[in-house]
Image: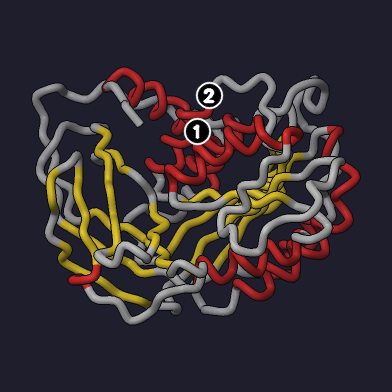
Amino acid sequence: MRTTSHQAAVVLALFASGAIAQAPAAAPPDAALMVRARLVAVDAIVRDAAGHFVHNLTRDDFTLTEDGKPQTLRYLSEDEDLPLTIGLLIDTSGSQRSYFPEQRVASLTFLTAMLTRPRDKAFIVRFASDILSLQTMTANLTYLETALGRLTERSLKPGGGANGTHLFDAICATAANSFATDTPDDLGRRAIVVLTDGEDQGSRATVDQAAQCAMLGNIAVYTALYSSDDPGPQPEDDPHNVYPIHHYLHGRTLMERISRASGGRVFLVSKKLPIDHIYQLIQSDLRGQYRLAYTPSPSKPLTYHRIDLKAVDKQQKVQARIGYFTPK
């Protein structure tokens, strides 16, 4: 993903001025200023050729480059007990309303299974032509259950809920505002699960800017794609659920760009792969990650750097974010 300093400034403005809550845009960075990030953390999942998780790896089992230059890994941990902050971002446009009953049940089961550590927390946001926080960050399952019952709540914004599906704006606004009490340097993991058909109508942000908003916040974006058409038989050995179903291609392609950039995955909801099963796969991902870290070279604020993390064993595949921005 090629990013200019102008693009980065645009993304920062989108990131800071999301529709959930307004915040002042940041001033342009001083071109002469150089920043050294203390450490760049990368969460990674490793699978073998059969798609099974690979455990007990060491730093010597990985190679990592930043902008093509080899980096020395300073830290590696395989810890299932790291705190988790997870957000549900739910599309409430007209095409998605028939899915609300099953989404409520499966989402509550998922959150109950995920919020098991003292520092785990979650929030819920719904979006259509506007973006509404149904529940801010909390560990209280009763609050989250109540919020799931408010998916069809009428917009508080004049004209809201009419035409439009501001998917990309919702990702930027959620990354900026719903994680406001958290910090990217927090030791835990951060993720968004988006329930949508993948179609955007009316966003200010582009698909690549939405990906950059997620990377600015070090947030993995997972997507469950819904459609009125069932994709039919699906191969068991496809860990990324990339099936040649024409109806899904556009939405899947857009969300794959965001999920792959941020270290998440895209799933297609179907009779064979229902939402409760997808939530189980996401749960396994978030609790089965390695945390790696390295010390980067100094660079200008908001400079984009490409990360390429690989396993030494060519039969092993690594799922991780593909880049980061130097902090302001």
Query: Which residue type does callout 1 highlight?
Result: Ala
Q: Is residue 167 left or right of residue 27?
A: right
Which residue appears at 50% of the width and 33% of the height?
Answer: 210
Other-residue count near label 1 (Cα within 10 Å), few / some / many at <14 / 14–19 / ≥20: many
Up the image or down, 249 lies above or below 72; here it is above
Q: Is residue 17 left or right of residue 228?
A: left
Q: Is residue 304 left or right of residue 162?
A: left
In the rendering, at what x and y percent does residue 37 appear? 18, 48
Up the image or down, 94 lies above or below 148; here it is above
- Numbered badge on residue 205: 2
Which residue appears at 53% of the width and 24% of the height?
Answer: 205
In the rendering, at what x and y percent does residue 287 appear? 50, 73
Up the image or down, 316 lies above or below 79; here it is above
Q: CA distance from mark 1 to mark 2?
A: 6 Å
Which residue appears at 31% of the width and 18% of the height?
Answer: 6
In the rendering, at what x and y percent does residue 27 appear? 29, 23
Name the secondary structure under disc 2: loop
Other-residue count near label 2 (Cα within 10 Å), few / some / many at <14 / 14–19 / ≥20: many
Residue under numbered circle 1: 210
Which residue appears at 58% of the width and 35% of the height?
Answer: 253
Query: Which residue type does callout 2 highlight?
Result: Ala
**Location of residue 16 (image quadrant):** top left
Name the secondary structure under disc 1: helix
Up the image or down, 26 lies above or below 268; here it is above
Instruction: Pick whichever of labels 1 and 2 is earlier in the sequence.
Output: 2
In the rendering, at what x and y percent does residue 279 appear? 67, 64
Are circles 1 and 2 on residues that touch, CB within 8 Å? yes
**Location of residue 235 (image quadrant):** bottom right
Q: Is residue 106 left or right of residue 187?
A: right
